[in-house]
Image: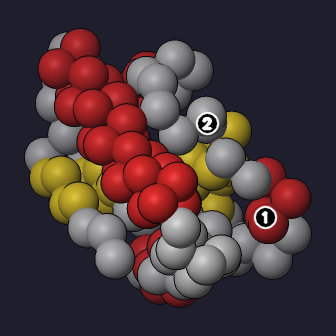
């Protein structure tokens, strides 16, 4: 099954992508930070994504078995100022909207959408 994971280089996304690839799934990780992809498991494909638009990856969702949306600014990266809280919240809203836009445009909708954030 083709599985797209947004935030696939994060704390949960990295081990999830590894487990799914090990089980033989076609795993595509969307990431804003391709420099973190050095140690992605074999068989995991990387697609650069800005974290807020449907541009550049929509065609991958067409017929995918699942999309797992874990994207968002890291909650432990910096002290939580008012601006940081807004960034954390907005990054999740933007990612969720982009995922829904991609699913809406897909001819063959993904079978499952899983969305989670810390």
Q: Where, quadrant-wise, is the N terminus in this rendering? A: bottom left
How many tags in the picture? Answer: 2
Q: Residue at x 26, y 67 (%)?
A: 116
Q: Position of residue 104 (x, y in %)?
A: 17, 20
The residue that disc 2 covers is 49
Image vertical order of residue 101 relative to residue 61, above or below: above
Residue hosting label 1: 37
Residue 65 vs 116, above or below: the answer is above
Q: Is residue 27 visible?
A: no
Q: Residue furthest front?
A: 82
Nearest to the observer: residue 28 or residue 86: 86
Residue depicted at 23% across the width and 14% down the height:
105
Residue 50: image tag: none
Above or below 96: residue 52: above
Whole-angstrom CA distance, mark 2 to mark 1, is 13 Å
Horizontal placement of 110 versus 91: left or right? left
Compared across the picture, whether 63 is left or right of 86 comes to left
Q: Of the two numbered discs 2 and 1 on the same chain, state the one appearing first in sequence.
A: 1
Image-quadrant location for residue 41:
bottom right
What secondary structure is found at the residue carrying circle 1?
helix
- On the image, the x and y values in percent for residue 88 come to 45, 58
Residue 34 rendering spot, x and y as whole percentages: 79, 52
- Name the spot of residue 58 as percent of width and height, x first: 42, 23
The image quadrant that residue 76 belongs to is: bottom right
Residue at 20%, 40% (x, y): give it.
Answer: 110
- Residue drawn 79% across the image and 66% down it: 36
């Amino acid at each position: 099954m083709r599985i797209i994971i947004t935030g696939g280089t994060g704390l949960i996304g990295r081990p999830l992508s590894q487990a799914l690839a090990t089980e033989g799934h076609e795993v595509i990780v969307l990431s804003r930070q391709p420099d973190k992809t050095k140690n992605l498991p074999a068989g995991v494909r990387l697609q650069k994504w800005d974290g807020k638009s449907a541009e550049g990856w929509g065609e991958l969702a067409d017929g995918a078995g699942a999309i797992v949306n874990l994207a968002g600014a890291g909650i432990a990266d910096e002290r939580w100022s008012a601006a940081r809280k807004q960034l954390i919240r907005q990054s999740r809203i933007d990612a969720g909207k982009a995922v829904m836009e991609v699913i809406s445009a897909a001819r063959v909708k993904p079978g499952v959408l899983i969305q989670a954030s810390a």
